[in-house]
Image: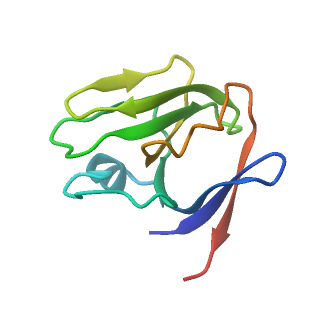
Amino acid sequence: MKVATLRKEDGTVVCARVSLALNPFVRMKGLLGRDSLAVDEGILLRPAGSIHMLFMRFAIDVVFCDEELVVLSVVPGLRPWRMAAERGAKVVIELAEGAAAAIRPGDHLSIATIDL
């Protein structure tokens, strides 16, 4: 799986290590089976407009974006056994709880792949 850095338009790093889940199997697995998510870690699901937290073990922040990575909405602290969706979203970014505190609707995000 490719890994990228996620930044806001002003260059602020939102997530230093975001995994790119671009195929159906990787998107379906998502963060299932994990016990936690490091504060500098996340996953970008594309295409996706909704997520579920069935069988998850911890809360996350969820960022819904359009196809140009413009933030449509942010759901902080989504707990296990909940669902979230946003009309028009094409990308979902799952971050550690609290990591999306500085992200607002209308922010433009960018990704740059990194070599590991």
Tell me what residue is drawn at x 41 percent, y 61 percent: 38
Image color mode: rainbow
Instruction: Residue at the far bottom: name it.
Output: 116
The quadrant where residue 33 appears: bottom left
Instruction: Residue at the far top: name it.
Output: 87
At which x and y percent is residue 85?
Answer: 42, 22
Is 82 situated left or right of 14 in this image?
left
Q: Relative to residue 10, is residue 66 depicted above or below? A: above
Is 107 situated left or right of 71 in this image?
right
> In the rendered image, which quarter contains the C terminus?
bottom right
Of the pair 34 and 27, the residue shown nearer to us: 34
At which x and y percent is residue 10?
Answer: 84, 48
Tell me what residue is drawn at x 29 percent, y 57 percent: 36
The quadrant where residue 111 appears: bottom right
Instruction: Residue at the far left: name it.
Output: 55
At which x and y percent is residue 71?
Answer: 65, 31
Q: Relative to residue 101, is residue 25 depicted above or below? A: below
Residue 21 in sight from this viewpoint: no
> In the rendered image, which quarter contains the N terminus?
bottom left
Residue 67 in sight from this viewpoint: yes
Is 45 situated left or right of 10 in this image?
left
Tell me what residue is drawn at x 52 percent, y 16 percent: 87
Count of numbered tags: 0
Is 115 situated left or right of 26 in this image?
right
Instruction: Residue at the far right: name it.
Output: 10
Tell me what residue is drawn at x 30 percent, y 54 percent: 25
